[in-house]
Image: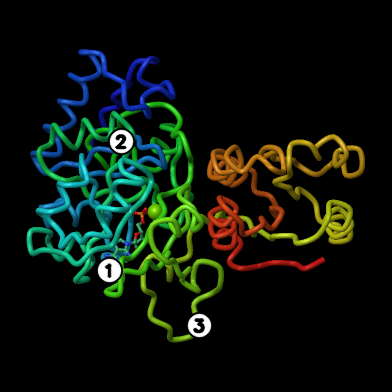
Amino acid sequence: MITEIVKLSEATESAERYGTAFTLSPEDDAKIKSCAEIIKRGGLVVFPTETVYGLGGDATSPTAASKIYEAKGRPSDNPLIIHVSCPEEAEKYAYTTELYYRLAEAFMPGPLTVILDAKDSVPSKTRGGLSTVAVRCPTDAVARRLIELSGVPIAAPSANLSGSPSPTRAKHVIDDMLGRVDAIIDGGECEFGLESTIVKINSDDTLTLLRPGKITPTELEKIAPVTVADAVVDKLKEGEVAISPGMKYRHYAPSSPVVLLDGNLDKCLNYIEKTGQNNQAFICYTDEAEAILKRLPSLTLYPIGAREDLFTQAHLLFSILREADTKNHSCIYAHLPKREGIGLALYNRLIRAAAHTIINL
Ligand code: AMP
Ligand code: MG
């Protein structure tokens, strides 16, 4: 398959496109229109969102859903999120509730995915055979315009090959998806860099957090009581059925082993030094880099941002995992994040990358 790369203007790549006042130039709008035609014809278009790049197809078409699973190499029991251009559009595809609209009022458009009971208008293939459907309305002006012009909701998982880190830059998408999709819209770097927060609305109007993201449990608690699903921070137990099918798959993992270190810098460096291996790497805090290099000059460092700057860490994590994956490191170490606020999302992604290997120092 020939993949067309659709480069948007620098103005559209700016952070302003996540604001409400942003208008696309006529040139960019025409480019997005031609991508919407591909979606209407049943093809696949990769597009940027404020979280990560999405691999999009017509959510109402079982054939498009099959193509998405195939392009990603994703098991077809792992359902797709459907992206709508406004919260009310969910009506056609899901049984919305009063709580859904309270969440929409607080967080949509935005990086929140809500699981609702599905209507038959969403093919079973898109829902991975479940009776529920995941709905999200992205903030990104490019994503929303693409959905609007397509005239259908867009089913879109992250645009990576199954098992590798989600793409946050067009280069990541090109590495994984060239020849597998009809078009890739290059809109620069994604604003946040980790996938959306996913919540399920329960019948008693409480929420279960299935995947942590930019919208934190504390923010959600202002709207309804929240329980964090065990699998967000722990391994699924033997034989346990995942509430969200994605929880059971290994994720975000580079081919080198990733090990999380729980202890202060001195203890981390003692541990790394003792292993005595060559070509090791450390995803460290930016403010530590100088001291580490003085002590272990042969260690490859990937500074991820200041210790307290969780936004920068979220923004860089997947890029760093991808870059480290090209270097054949014998081991990639990282600090175990605190589970507070956005730290919970970093923790959740890192324990998956590390296949739950945590060293308590
Ligand atoms: P991705 O599309 O790559 O961001 O992953 C979407 C995540 O949402 C996966 O972990 C899915 O298992 C999860 N998901 C999608 N639809 C549902 C649903 N109806 N119920 C529970 N989890 C879902
Ligand atoms: Mg994904």
Between disc 3 and disc 2, whose residue precedes? Answer: 2
First of labels 1, 3 by sequence position: 1
Q: Secondary structure at mark 1?
A: loop
For the residue marked with disc 3, what is the amino acid?
Lys
**Residue at image mark 1:** 77
Query: What amino acid is at disc 2?
Result: Phe
Distance (Cα) linking label 1 and label 3: 19 Å
Q: Is residue 308 left or right of residue 151?
A: right
Q: Residue at x 53, y 54 (%)?
A: 345
Q: Which mark is residue 237?
A: 3
The quadrant holding residue 41 is top left
Q: Is residue 326 left or right of residue 178?
A: right
Is residue 324 placed above or below 92 in the rendered structure? above
Point 42% across, 66% down: residue: 225
Mark 1 vs mark 3: give the one in front.
3
Q: Return the residue at label 2.
A: 47
